[in-house]
Amino acid sequence: MTSDVPVDPTINDAFRQMSALIYAGADAGSIHQSLVDSALRLVEGCDRASLLVRTRDRYVTAASTDDIARRIDQIELEVGEGPCVDAIVSEAYQHDADLTDAKTPWPRFTERIVAETPVRSAIGYRLLLEGDKVGALNLFSDTPGGLTSKSADVGAVIASFASVALMAIRAREEAATLRQGLTSNREIGKAVGLLMAAHHISGQEAFELLRSTSQELNMKLALVASQVIQGQESQFGHAGPAGGATADSQV
């Protein structure tokens, strides 16, 4: 990317809107869609865009401006070459201004794109998350030469923001997982305490009872614990076990 890219108030406004989505807690799908929609609106010559992200051990299209952009992603993955695939594994973005040029570095990709879609120019940007290659932002134009060096510069700015957005999404997901884990641990601890009181057993024995029930019923341990708590509260109220009753029927 060149060092003298002018600050565009339209781009700044788009970034403010996308930032607002992130901090407002919008779901990942909405943020992904906002990124490709912004690329379509801000990059000169861009007629369609897509976002490839890695899910476990494969790449999937997380968002696209239309079915053609999504189809191009599929073609790239099928043939194993193209600007977006190369962008993921290389250091620099990949730009082919004219896919009808016989000198294209991706002959199989180009042949199918020209035959099956109206796209004639493409740029792919690698997205990094803490040094990890997690996907690509892909821009397409239906005009040969439609994506220029200026287009590539603006797209690079959006791709950088996309990496930040993906980082925010991951941080939010990790926080949610942590909260869920803490909640589950509290539920399990409470269920262990109730079983100890109801059965007059040790904490280890109460936990083993939960664990064995979880395996027998093929249910998550936290779900079994939640059902124990609900059963105990329903049977004994908030005062806890009394009057010699047991919780045998609850686990």
Image (cartoon, rainbow, N blue to C red):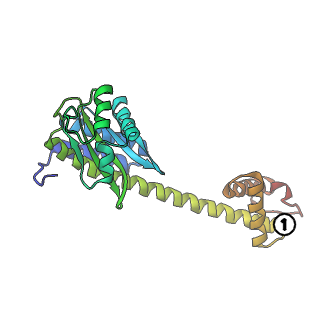
- Residue 92 image position (x, y, % from top left): 24, 53
- The residue to which callout 1 is attached is 199
Question: In this rendering, would 218 be left or right of 250?
Answer: left
Q: Along the horizontal axis of the image, is 180 left or right of 219?
A: left
Asked if one can make out residue 16 in the rendered structure from this viewpoint, the answer is: no
In the depicted view, which residue is nearer to us: 88 or 238? 88
235 w.r.t. 207: above or below: above
The residue under the point 27% across, 52% down is 160
**Measured from the top left, where is residue 105 in percent x and y?**
24, 42
**57 or 108: which is nearer to us?**
108
Please name the amino acid that badge 1 sits on.
Answer: His
Residue 60 lies, with reference to residue 131, above or below; the image says above
- Compare residues 142 and 233 and report the one nearer the observer: 142
Q: Residue furthest right?
A: 244
Which quadrant would residue 164 be assigned to in this image?
bottom left
> What residue is drawn where x is 77% and y is 61%?
212
> Could you say where residue 127 lies in the image, as x and y percent from the top left?
32, 52
Q: Image quadrant of residue 223? A: bottom right
As drawn, 150 above or below 169: above
Instruction: Note whether residue 192 is visible.
Output: yes
Q: Position of residue 109 (x, y in %)?
A: 31, 36
Picture quadrant of residue 241 = bottom right
Locate the C terminus and report the quarter of the image it occupies.
bottom right
Q: Please, what secondary structure does the residue beneath circle 1 have?
A: helix
Task: Tell me which residue sits at (74%, 62%) in the image.
Answer: 211
